[in-house]
Image (cartoon, grey):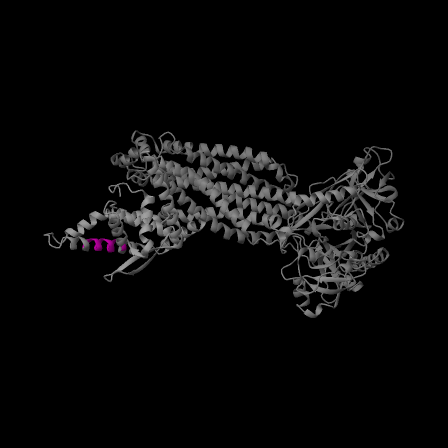
Amino acid sequence: MAFEWMHTIWFRLKALFRRKQFDRDLHDEIAFHLSKREESIRKDARDGVRSDKAPLLDARRQFGNTTRIAETTREMWSFPRLETFWQDIRYSFRVMRNNPGFTVVAVLTLGLGIGVNAGVFSILNAAALRPLPVPRAGEVVSIAQILSGKYSRNVHGEGSLVSYVEYKNYRDQSHVLEGLAAYEPFQEATLGGKNSQRLVGQLTSCNYFDVLHVRPELGRGFIGSECAAPGETAVVVLSDKVWRGVFDADPAIVGQTIRLNRTSFTVIGIGPSGFDGTEFTETQFWVPVTMQKAVDPLRTRLSDDNMSWLMLLGRVQPGVRIEQVRAELGVIAARADQSHPGRQTRILVQRASMFDRPEERPYIFAAGGVVLAAVGLVLLVVCANLANLFLARVSARTKEMSIRLTLGAGRMRLVRQIVTESLLIALMGGVVGTILAWWSAEGIVKFVASQAPKDEIGAIKVSVAPDWRVLVFALGVSILTCLAFGLAPALRASKANLNEALKSGEAAGPGGRRTKGFSGRVLVGVQVAFSMILLLAAGLLLRGLYHAQSIEPAFEMRGTAVVTLDLAEEGYDGPRAATFHRELRRRLTSLPGVDGVAAGWATPLGTNWSSESFSIPGTQVSGQVETNEISPGFFSLLGIPIVRGRDFTDADAAGGGHVVIITEAAARKFWPGEDPIGKALLGFGRKDISVVGVARDANISHLTESHPVYVFLPAGKDEQIVWKVLVHNSLGFASTATEIRDTVRGLDPELLVNIAPLEANLEILRTPSRIVAIVAGVLGILALALASLGVYGMVSCAVGRRTREIGIRMALGAGGGNVKRLIVRQAMWPVVIGILIGIVGCAAVSKILSVLLFGLSAHDPIAFLSVPVFLFVVALVACYLPARRAVRVDPMVVLRYE
Amino acid sequence: MADTGDLLQGTLDMLILKTLQRGALHGYAVAEAIHMRSDDALRVEEGALYPALHRLELRGLLAAEWGVSENNRRAKYYKLTATGRKYLEAELAHWNRMVAAIGRVIQPA
């Protein structure tokens, strides 16, 4: 009878929307019946002596109660539940219109609370939940290898990536995958010619576009034969953005050649617009994976069977479950493990998103979780605040409720009414919040992207436009908040004591006298506790930031420029790089004001660092130590004295680099109490190493590590290819930048030069903590404002309710000061308890912030003392203001009123 | 219909459908027909007819349209739909089976 059911709904809907017409019809139908009946009665009694009205009355009697019958009939056609709901909604809107201030405050604070939550969620969603922007993305899975046991492995990027041989094994032996593509996520290349610039692209297997079902908008994608042999087919697909931005959307570019890292590539296609690859950063070009050596001549990743460097994306055949893929690839991996005794490979398969590598995902979720927890706290404070507002309003409306109860409204009906009101407010807050989220998420991503270094991995392109997940999240949060702040007041309202409320007339609260205001106090305590946690976190981070700003590195940063070159990408080999650097140093030294030129692989406090394993013959000391391959003059340029021995000379590098300089901390650790000069070390890929110098300790690696264990090596020719050049100018950084660029251009006009002040390294370090401190500070202040509003409201409410009591006290001789103290003392109890709970709560979780605190203790006493005092004072003011009003009560007025 | 010799709801539905079997009628005519054919034994409280008519319309067993009555007044005419016809047949069959069964039980053996 599905048809009958649909028919019924359809008719009811018609009746709902044409209600007037329907009522008129029903009325006409009944009137018609009555008049026919009246006529017939008249006919039957034509000869009788009946008054004119009698037949009509008879007809009515025969018909029955017209109103009731009309009502019964109407009910057939309507949705009775829905209509009460509709009534509730209209009533709620009337209530809201009558209290516009309340409504606006409630909707806005809630919107703010939901907004920051949905905003953070939409970023998390965009990063880790949203599927890839390709057709039928649900079928695309990412695949990673987790190695364990005894093995050694070369890694480029993350260890969960696979080698080219492993990729081909999986691709050729799998039966459940429709296709399997591999790509190297980030490959920098310098685009040659007049548009010379740095691009970030991917080396991909030739089925990349086919597996993803992405069709180039111009030209074609790769064909299988282009990946047949290494280094033979120099073809490239450009992204739509690069095509428009760099090549002015010239369609003739397809078929022409461009130069990437000095190798000529033929452009065979342009990717579809809006497709920026499958990473969280923009991919600007794609070349066949077999061209790896042409793009990055120094490395031989393609032929290295034990190299982690390729990311895998597979498309599963219809109807195949992820577990089947995992099982099948696991079998293939186990076969490969047989030739690596002691190694076990575990396969991870998941629906592909922008952030898939198992090394990144936990980090994203942990960071996202912390931030979600923080904004969740704000939302809880908002809810507690709204619950308090609602409770106060329910108290004020006790009389209305009592009258409705007296007139026979069911208690459930009242509860439903209040819940409807809060649901409406929650949904309106949800709408405001979603708009806010959209806007704020975009802003946050832009802000973070502008702070993040984009040289090595490309521009962050996470799209935060809300999709259904964000909308569902916002709706869910709205409904939860509605329950959180609406249910308690609703239940309270329905418990209204009729007699008491009607008798006393004023807003004698619902519930017994004893519990009066109790839930309000709990709510205030909760708000204070949550605000305390947020404020303390913000205080800690601000202290950490201040700490970081005030740490001066124990070396000279001012006036030094860092020059980054792309010799490797431009195909320089070791001897050429060495010649280049010798000449560059000669020319730079002669520039006016330049009084020091040095070079190193890592710059002090820079983002790249490496560690190598070592051991000391004749001792138990061994392990990993941070290293840097540097030029002579590195220490004097940075103002770090050599406390023992000597600096490197050009002869050290030329002689094979069998000498090292170590830090004082390293000397103390390796040879406690002995003279380190001339001592031997093993490791670093060199032979017969001995110590020639000891440099004074300085925090060159981590800002907070002032005694680093660190080993400096003289750079051989090959290591000079990746050098960064440091130039110190006594006239300051700004005056040298152009001249340095011109000098480099004079040596090789094709090179890309990037020049930045060395102090920028410090900025990069401080940025994350600045971002987090700003966010936590804003959230903390928001929570503080809400909590003090809550305290203020609670005290005002209590004062209003206790007017009579205060009047009597004062009539009996209590002084204004006494009354004020009484009120403030009672109100501050929940505040103090909230503060204590907040302190304990924050102390329990503040460890997670320690990476952002630059060595400041996670239980920093200054933050943990000053912030609670601050909150206490704010709450005290919030209590005192309404308490002052209480003592202005004139006892006579109050007593007479009774 | 409380004072009309307890007409079960289903029975009233059946009577209405049966009455409409021969063509479209307005509500008054349906009431009259039920009176006449039952020799006034089934005296429906006339108003009770309307919720029933509307319920049947809502279930799609009747279709209704507005027309003009004998003396030129706007009246709502009901007629059986195909579903209504099938439903009536099923109901009648069921009714007859039941009456026969009851008859067998109460008839002296």
In the picture as drawn, the residue positioned furthest to the bottom comes out as A252
Q: Is residue A30 magenta?
A: yes
Q: Which residues are magenta?
A: A29-38
Give residue A764's position: percent from left, percent from top: 66, 49
* Residue A751 on image: x %, y %: 77, 61
Please give left or right for residue A344 compared with residue A17 in the image.
right
Instruction: Establish if A727 lies above or below A874.
Output: below
Q: Is residue A114 visible?
A: yes
Q: Is residue A389 above or below residue A314?
A: above
Instruction: Left or right? Give the position of A577 relative to A512.
Output: right
Q: Is residue A655 left or right of residue A701?
A: right
Camera-nearest residue between A669 and A618:
A618
Q: Position of residue A483 (x, y in %)?
A: 45, 40
Where A518 sits versus A35, above or below? above
Q: Residue at x 85, y 58 (%)?
A: A576
- Main SS of the magenta segment? helix
Residue A99 falls within the magenta-colored stretch: no
Q: How many discs appear?
A: 0
- The answer to whether residue A552 is visible is no
Between residue A38 and residue A219, name the one nearer to us.
A38
Quarter residue A81 falls in: top left
